[in-house]
Image: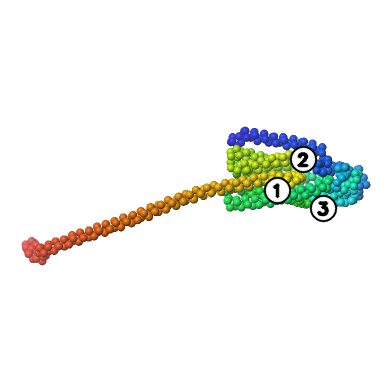
Amino acid sequence: MSKRYSPKRIAWSAGLAITFFLYFTLVDYYGKKYRENHSGDTLQSGDTLLNKDWKFHSGDNLQWASAGFSDEQWQKVNTDSMPLSYHGEISWFRHKVNAGENLFKDPLVIHLYHAGASEIFYDGIKVASFGNVSGEKEKEVCMDPSHFPISIRLGDTSSHLIAVRYSELHYPSFTGGKDAYPLGFEMSLVKAPYSLSRQLQGHRLLSIVFAAGIFLLTLSFVHILLYVFYRKAKENLFYSIFAFCYAMIFILQYIINSSSSPQLIFFSQKIFLLFLNPLVFLALLIFISRVYNERYGFAAWLAGAVGSIGVLFAFTNWLSPSFYFTSLVWYALFNVIIMTRGTYKAMKENRPGAKILGTGIGVFALFLFVGMSIIFFFHRIDFFFNTSGTPVLLILFFILMSIPISTSVYLAYNFSNTNKVLSVKLDEVEKLSAITIEQEKEKQKMLEGQKEVLEQQVKERTAEIREQKELIEEKNKSITDSILYALRIQQALLPTEKYIRKNLKDPSEKKE
């Protein structure tokens, strides 16, 4: 068995997974007990939840808004967990509020959330309308009223009636399958000063969220350009994908928390849950693997499995929301654990920049652990939107941006080190070039000196050859003159050919 899949490593991973499973199971169990014991209580923030003990009746009759109408025969329901027999048809809900001393002193507002259409009546008087309530799906106009609080005032300590005329016929056509989102609505009474403070705080938080999204989009654009111009540095590509997906998460959160269209909200949540969440962790893990030169191929298979579960959750009735949400949470924790382990190993090996990445990943891992604990305990994912105080929001912002910031710092650090190495190499090249140039100059000087010597030697040798030539020519002339002189003497002494022929005859001629 290879080192990567040694028994010790498998045992360590299994033990860690079991530990986390037991921890979150206990948090969910005690959270369920807490929610059961505190449902409907007045919270420290001033919210009084009004989800329990409503009277419900299908049909439509404006007389049911009257405080004097008797609803003793009506069905008792919780508006955030309607019976299975209810399918969103037009219906009425009635709830009596006893104004205690804690509600009597301050003006109040009603906070309402739903995916259908509603009309709100307070002591028989219509105080708000959201969308268009109708018994026909084509005429129903759905609206999310969470951004439009309803102001009321309890004039005495007696009971008051809140009646809601409601329809939700579009469910589940745009919610993504049966039981993907609960039918009904959620309502709470909030003290007006706190409600105003929370709205202002929400606007500040949304501004920070939107700014973070734009900042991350800018980072994504810069790094994709770096990859285009230098293809070998593929970590820039994966970081760009991570930054883009993370940016879209912030932007979709901005849309979800500022829009009043249930269709747009549900669509944004689908994109957020189904694609961006798995992809952002996968891109980040691949980036880390490129940086540390590690292989996490199984993460891609796991991302594909989570994505498949998400598609089944969105377009079929086979999976419950809790199952997909749990899968997504475990997938995120798995990736963070792998990244944390890889970073710790790199820090032990003193790899350049590992501490920078380790800081961001460590902060985010701690935040994810605490955040998941709160989500499992309260079963709410909007806990950070209810924070108060600008310092808290800034701390939250830097926590959420810890990985992008640390990664950008690491890439800048890596780029700076690369430039330093290149500068050193350039200095060495310049020094070597200078030495080479000097050597070439000296060589040229030597060649020029040798050329002059050779030219002088050639001149001297040419002179010698010319002298020898002249000497040889003189000797040749002398020899030639001697030979000619001897020839003349011979010619003078010897008889002519005619004479010889005349006096000397051929013996053959004598015989004849």
For this rendering, which residue is in front, 439 or 322? 439
> Secondary structure beneath disc 3?
loop
Which residue is under mark 3?
131
Q: Nearer the viewer, residue 485 or 360?
A: 360
In terms of secondary structure, where does tag 1 sit?
A: helix
Q: Is residue 301 visible?
A: no
Answer few, some or many: residues within 10 Å of disc 3's Cα (few below 14, many 20 plus, some between 14 and 19).
Answer: some
Residue contact between numbered discs 3 and 2, judged by CB atoms under 8 Å: no
How many residues crowd around disc 2 within 10 Å: few (fewer than 14), some, or many (20 or more)? some
Q: CA distance from mark 1 to mark 3?
A: 28 Å
Q: Residue at x 31, y 55 (%)?
A: 457
In the rendered image, which residue does mark 1 sit on? 249
Q: Quadrant of the C terminus?
A: bottom left
Type of amino acid at the residue the image marks with label 2: Phe
Q: Amino acid at mark 1?
A: Ile
Real-space Cα distance between discs 2 and 1? 22 Å
Quadrant of image for the N terminus:
top right
Label 3 or label 2, whichever comes before in sequence order: 3
Image spot of residue 373 (x, y percent): 73, 39
Q: Residue at x 86, y 44 (%)?
A: 103
Q: Amino acid at mark 3?
A: Gly
Checking the image for residue 378, the label placed there is 2
Residue 478's spot in the image, x, y percent? Answer: 18, 60
Q: Earlier in the sequence, mark 1 or mark 3?
A: 3
For numbered disc 2, what is the local secondary structure?
Answer: helix
- The image position of residue 346, as x and y in percent, is 60, 40
Does the CB distance between marks 2 and 1 fall below 8 Å?
Answer: no
Seen in the image, is 295 located left or right of residue 260? Answer: left
